[in-house]
Amino acid sequence: MSILDHMVGGDKVYEIFLCFRGPKGNAFGQRIPIKIKVGLPKPVFTEADVYKLAIKFHESGFGSIEQCAAIVKQNNCDEAASMKALTSTTESSEKE
């Protein structure tokens, strides 16, 4: 089964109908309804990407490379989300 070009990934549910066809191409039987939700592709990142970002945060003073790498992995290598998590972690440790 192929996804058509006009189907966009997200929360929308598409309904398609399948049917059986005979040797001459004539449809027979009842239509079979199928609902499809097209998912968005998950971003792919490598260990090298994780450690590049972790080293960047480490050099900025946000903790050890291991701590930074763990937070970067938790945030799927998203720099903005990782920065927010590291900032909140740093602020909470300063309060103690």
Image (tube, rainbow, N blue to C red):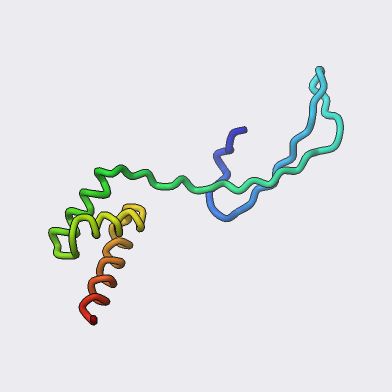
Residue 1 image point, x, y percent: 62, 33
Foreground of the two, 89 or 96: 96
Residue 8 image point, x, y percent: 54, 47
Q: Image quarter for residue 86?
A: bottom left
Residue 39 image point, x, y percent: 53, 48
> In the rendered view, would you say 20 is above or below 8?
above
Q: Is residue 26 left or right of residue 59?
A: right
Foreground of the two, 94 or 3: 94
Taking the view exactly as shown, the residue that stands out farthest to the right is: 29
> In the rendered view, would you say 76 is above or below 88?
above
Taking the view exactly as shown, the residue that stands out farthest to the bottom is: 95
> In the rendered view, would you say 22 is above or below 42?
above
Q: Image quarter for residue 47?
A: top left
Foreground of the two, 78 or 24: 78
Residue 26 image point, x, y percent: 83, 25
**On-image quarter of the C terminus:** bottom left
| Residue depicted at x 29% and y 56% | 70
| Residue depicted at x 80% and y 25% | 21
